[in-house]
Amino acid sequence: MKNIDVFNGDADGICALIQLRLAHPTDSTLITGVKRDIQLLKKVSAKKGDKVTVLDISMEKNTNELHNLLAAGVSVFYVDHHIPGEIPKHINLEVIIDTSPTTCTSLLVDKYLKGKYREWAIVAAFGDNMRKSALSTAKKLLLSTSHIEQLKQLGISINYNGYGSNLDDLHFKPDQLYLEMVKYTSPFDFIKDSQSAYKKLQTGYDNDIALTNTLNPETSTKNTAIYKLPNELWARRVSGVFGNQLANQYPDRAHAILTDHPEGGFTVSVRAPINNLNHAGELCSKFPTGGGRKGAAGINQLPDGQVDAFISLFNETYLL
């Protein structure tokens, strides 16, 4: 029997797998990619008796591949918080899916493991910009303000590392980052270890986010703002966390970040208002390479000819 772990390359996917493998160590094949590489089941080669664990990957975007695995006799454990589409009913499929805008995959895994490695779940919740959920979970551990801030910064920096057009854009490939971090039972040990990847992650984030300080929106209203970023390495890496930063600064406003795509068109990040975490996934799913969840979503490549249609729908969705 072969074990295969399939996970999103962001903080949520990585931290979800860390929790599971700390609780249930096993030799496994790792399949992941940049944050926007979500059709990961296409990369899975498995046969009857194998077990595939899928974390923080849209079931809707992997429906055919999931059906094929199940039909081949592969056992699948699927945990996610994105819009799933129709969930198959199959004896080989175990599913934990919750699309509530206040939860993420790592928090679902935390509940599944009864809080055994809860600090890592808090890191992921901060990375997914679920501050209220992260703070309420941290209170259960009676963490100090200083310790909470450390987990927040780690979550943001891990999430930041997942953005890019390809793996070469990233400071660390997600599977390599996972393999380094899973050595630490507690994220505080990872942070404290001067030989760990943390310092490089934090420095990269600090340098790139500083370049957004002079950016102004292309258009803005009381309810929406649209930013355009250039086709530069720092912009591709920072697009998602910049959207999160704006969402926290303006909690009643929806934000769209359009970054020039290397192959033409734009990569799009959408953040619903913090005070109304809805519609983002539904909005982006109307475009061929789009998807996500209620509070945050994106479009991998929006053609130039569809930009006006997107902007119109974005403003309509969040009431211009």
Image (tube, rainbow, N blue to C red):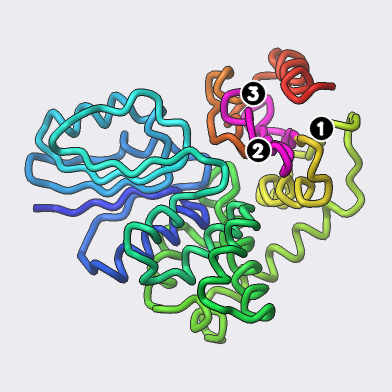
Disc 1 to disc 3, how far (Cα)?
14 Å
Q: Give the residue displayed 23% in from the left and 69% down from the top.
A: 25
Of the residues tagged 1 and 3, which is closer to the observer? 1
Residue 191 visible in the shown view: yes
Above or below, 266 relative to 229: above
- For disc 2, the neighbor class at 10 Å (few under 14, some 14 to 19, many from 20) is some
Label at residue 216: none
**Residue 211 in the image, given as x and y percentages of width and height:** 83, 55
Q: Give the residue displayed 81% in from the left and 37% down from the top.
A: 253
Residue indicated by mark 1:
226
The residues colored magenta run 256-283
Q: Earlier in the sequence, mark 1 or mark 3?
A: 1
**Side of 68 where 42 appears, left or right:** right
Disc 3 to disc 2, how far (Cα)?
23 Å
Q: Give the residue displayed 42% in from the left and 72% down from the top.
A: 180
How many discs mark residues in the rendered view? 3
Residue indicated by mark 3:
302
- For disc 3, the neighbor class at 10 Å (few under 14, some 14 to 19, many from 20) is many
Of the residues tagged 1 and 2, which is closer to the observer? 2
Q: Give the residue displayed 66% in from the left and 70% down from the top.
A: 202
Q: Earlier in the sequence, mark 3 or mark 2?
A: 2
Residue type (three-letter) at the residue carrying disc 3: Leu
**Side of 112 where 210 appears, left or right:** right
**Residue 62 in the image, given as x and y percentages of width and height:** 35, 30
Residue 10 colored in magenta in the image: no
Label at residue 277: 2
Q: Nearer the viewer, residue 176 or 158?
A: 158
- For disc 1, the neighbor class at 10 Å (few under 14, some 14 to 19, many from 20) is some
Asked which quadrant contains residue 203, the reply is bottom right
